[in-house]
Image (tube, rainbow, N blue to C red):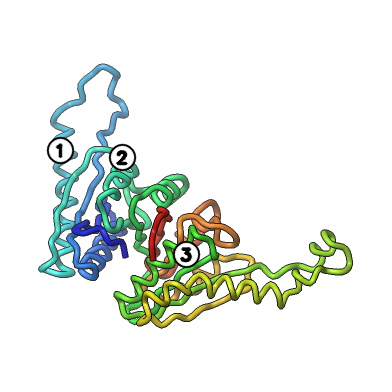
Amino acid sequence: MTDRTGAPVVVGVDGSPSALDAVRLAAREAVLRHRPLRVVNAFLWPLVGTPLGMVAPVLPDIELRQEAEKLVEEAVDEARKVDAELAVTGAVVDGGPVAVLLRESRDAALLVLGHRGLGGFAELLVGSAAVQLSARADCPVLVARGEARADGPVVVGVDGSALSDEAVGFAFAEAAARDAELVVVHTWLYPQPVSYREAFGDVLPLAYEPEQLRADEQRVLADAVAGWTERYPEVTVRPKLVAAATPARVLVEESVGAQLTVVGAHGRGSLGSLLLGSVSHAVLHHCHSPLAVVRHRGGRER
């Protein structure tokens, strides 16, 4: 988990059913972390149809802001249904959704989003907006997807790079806090003999024998968790090495029955583009559990 003393869990709302799902998820996460919850609505005055140089009418602005404040109040009430003792505050913040949430992430322990919304949040997890938040947010991003199974494992995808180490550490902390098993998934692409013959001729180098490749990938998986198992000895770890051409599909399948699925924002190898392009869309749109996206910030000590 992110250890910013006193930092709240922040959730973005817009009045959509998906946003209310995010509020309930955010409330549970705040309780788990013993942190306050901050509910935020991004308020952007609609300038369409307003001639340049003219002052926008005051009354519509007030009415729109009042509506935004009502949405926040309803979301705060929903959060308190999860836990009446939870410290919850709400705010209407001027600006576009992505800009507002990026600013909020600077002082947050966790940023929670619905996977679909209305208005400014409608395209939040489609195209460049999702990439911006996952790549630039200063805290982990949690997307309300599917159903979190209370007794299910935490699932994390690894690729062996330093960039995925942050996600692995986050997943270990989450598994420890939830008293859950941790499933660590690493995918590798089984070599196709034809392509290797084209590169090396009829005789393949010993280094490219499938058995050697599998052994190498097993070491990558073991190295990815080694330091963290020492730090979290109470966590039961189930490593899973899968030969597959589509890492997103593997993670989506593993997310069935999980409490939480965790991925890094960037990396290399088969999981290197997990949150970019078509692979990111597959995970975001098909994950069967809440999805945490953790950006590597560097300089982390185990």
Which mark, by number, is residue 17?
none
Secondary-structure class at tag 1: helix
Which residue is most to the left?
85
| Residue tagged 1 | 63
User: Could you say which is closer to the camera, residue 163 or residue 179?
Assistant: 163
Secondary-structure class at tag 3: helix
Secondary-structure class at tag 2: loop
| Residue tagged 3 | 286
Mark sitting earlier along the chain (2/1): 1
Q: Which residue: 29% across, 61% down? A: 22
Q: Percent position (x, y) of residue 2?
A: 30, 61
Which residue is most to the top?
53
The quadrant where residue 228 appears: bottom left
User: Could you say which is closer to the camera, residue 248 or residue 137?
Assistant: 137
Identify which amino acid the numbered label 2 is placed on: Gly
Badge 2: residue crowd in 10 Å (few <14, some 14–19, many ≥20): some
Q: Which residue: 22% across, 56% down? A: 7
Say if residue 280 shows up in the picture.
Answer: no
Front tag of 2 and 1: 2
| Residue tagged 2 | 96
Relative to 134, 250 lies left or right: right
Relative to 267, 149 lies left or right: left
User: Could you say which is closer to the camera, residue 211 or residue 117?
Assistant: 211
Q: Which residue: 46% across, 60% down? A: 264
Identify which amino acid the numbered label 3 is placed on: His
Q: Which residue: 82% across, 59% down? A: 199
Badge 1: residue crowd in 10 Å (few <14, some 14–19, many ≥20): few
Mark sitting earlier along the chain (1/3): 1
The quadrant where residue 32 appears: bottom left
Front tag of 1 and 3: 3
